[in-house]
Image: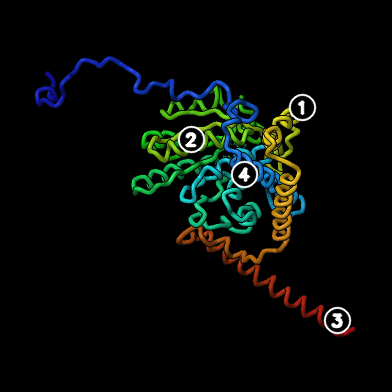
């Protein structure tokens, strides 16, 4: 007999019959992406909602083309376009209540705009002007996240904390297909499921992580299947079908709100533009593939449905386009104004106490700025002198 047994601490018991802790079948996604538009389910879709989705999609497309144009004019440093992915962006924003939180990635400025954020503020970071460009707490939109998937554990932490405090808050976190290979994705989903945190994970599978196609990213049957390993439901949806994405996300948000825990939604879509304006997509994919997706465009799909049901006439289309043009003209005009920035702000808001290297760099920059200000003053004086000499 061992010492532990003598003390009565260790009592060997026969091994229990092994059994699955959860039945995986209800967690499994459908074999095909869920669709509404062009199917029988469309008959049950709310007409007012379809109209609202349409107006937002057209506005969203115009926002995307305008932001891309601003990169060509040197007014925006970088823009990761969500052209072709507007249904996901818009639906993600519309399913949330004001009190909920959105956790976007760099590609999701449109979701932030559809949630009501000023487009200029949404583009501030991508213009390189300021740290976030908006107050995350005011809008309940976390800062746009460039390090892949790091927004996911943040979303879980916020949602879990809200639940502990008894606040009725759901967090919706957006991530790309490539982001699902990150450790943060695993950690976030695992904690979310164990804690039954009120979170919805929306993976926009747009086919590529820059030049890396999905089949080089994962060997999983689908990204939605990954949910089962964490013990949460996985849903597969046509990411270009705005009505379907809205329905699936609404269900997931309600489930989270009612204490049912997290859901992983994979929206199958396609990135129509290059990764950003700095990328050349022709180096890794052919035109035929891109063209094939044009027939499955999110605006086209909804337009077809609305027209067939007599819900869209010329006047309505004109009004929607007019609104989108007005937004684009305003965005263009305000982005063309030079911002008034202090380069010394670079050193603010990072550390409570600066490191010695940063203090040194700040001193260097201050000296350069003062020198160029003096030069400018002298130059201006010289020019005046020439003028007055004439
Ligand atoms: C942690 C981390 N690693 C690498 C990168 C560089 N990077 C930026 S975007 C990107 C591809 C991401 O693809 P995906 O998650 O599918 O999102 P998409 O850009 O298609 O929306 C990579 C690898 C990064 N930003 N962060």
In this rendering, would 7 be left or right of 303? left
Marks 1 and 2 in Cβ contact (< 8 Å): no
Distance from the alpha carbon under mark 3 to that under mark 4 = 59 Å
Label 3 and label 1: CA atoms lie apart by 61 Å
Q: Which residue is mark 1?
A: 288
Q: Nearer the viewer, mark 4 or mark 2?
A: 4
Q: Residue at x 34, y 48 (%)?
A: 166
Residue situated furthest bottom in the rendering: 389
Tell me which numbered mark, 3 or 2, is placed earlier along the sequence: 2
Q: Position of residue 388 (x, y in %)?
A: 85, 85
Mark 3 neighbour density, 10 Å: few (under 14) some (14–19) many (20 or more): few
Given the current orientation, which residue lies at the most extreme left position? 6
Circle 2 sits on which residue? Answer: 251
Which is nearer the N-term, disc 4 or disc 2?
4
Which label lies toward us, 1 or 4?
Answer: 4
Residue 184 shows in the view: no
On the question of residue 24 being in view, the answer is yes
Residue 43 point in image, percent of width and height = 60, 30
At 55% across and 46% down in the image, what residue appears? 145
Q: Is 179 situated left or right of 328 in this image? A: left
**Mark linked to residue 387:** 3
- Ligand number 1: quarter of image: top right
Front tag of 3 and 4:
4
Residue under circle 4?
52
């Amino acid at each position: 007999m061992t010492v532990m047994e003598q003390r009565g601490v260790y009592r060997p018991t026969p091994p229990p019959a092994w059994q699955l802790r959860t039945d995986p079948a209800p967690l499994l996604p459908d074999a095909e992406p869920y669709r509404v538009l062009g199917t029988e389910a469309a008959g049950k879709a709310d007409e007012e909602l379809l109209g609202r989705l349409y107006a937002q999609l057209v506005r969203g497309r115009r926002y995307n083309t305008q932001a891309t144009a601003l990169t060509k004019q040197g007014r925006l440093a970088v823009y990761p376009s969500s052209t072709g992915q507007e249904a996901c962006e818009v639906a993600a924003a519309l399913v949330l209540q004001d009190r909920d939180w959105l956790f976007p990635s760099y590609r999701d400025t449109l979701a932030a705009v559809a949630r009501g954020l000023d487009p200029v503020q949404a583009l501030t970071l991508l213009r390189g002007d300021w740290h976030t460009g908006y107050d995350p707490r005011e809008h309940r939109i976390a800062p746009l996240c460039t390090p892949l998937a790091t927004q996911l554990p943040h979303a879980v932490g916020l949602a879990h904390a809200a639940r502990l405090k008894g606040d009725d808050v759901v967090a919706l976190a957006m991530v790309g297909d490539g982001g699902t290979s990150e450790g943060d994705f695993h950690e976030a989903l695992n904690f979310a499921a164990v804690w039954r945190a009120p979170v919805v994970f929306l993976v926009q599978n747009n086919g590529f992580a820059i030049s890396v196609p999905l089949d080089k990213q994962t060997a999983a049957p689908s990204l939605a299947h990954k949910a089962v390993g964490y013990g949460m439901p996985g849903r597969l949806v046509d990411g270009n079908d705005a009505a379907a994405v809205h329905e699936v996300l609404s269900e997931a948000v309600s489930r989270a709100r009612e204490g049912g825990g997290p859901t992983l939604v994979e929206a199958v879509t396609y990135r129509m533009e290059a990764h950003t304006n700095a990328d050349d997509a022709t180096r890794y994919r052919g035109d035929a593939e891109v063209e094939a997706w044009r027939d499955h465009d999110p605006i086209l799909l909804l337009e077809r449905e609305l027209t067939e049901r007599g819900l869209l006439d010329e006047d309505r289309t004109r009004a929607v386009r007019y609104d989108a043009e007005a937004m684009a003209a305003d965005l263009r005009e305000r982005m063309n104004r030079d911002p008034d920035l202090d380069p010394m702000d670079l050193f603010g808001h990072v550390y409570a106490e600066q490191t010695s290297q940063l203090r040194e760099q700040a001193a260097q920059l201050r000296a350069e700025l003062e020198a160029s200000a003096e030069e400018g003053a002298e130059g201006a004086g010289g020019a005046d002198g020439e003028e007055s000499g004439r």
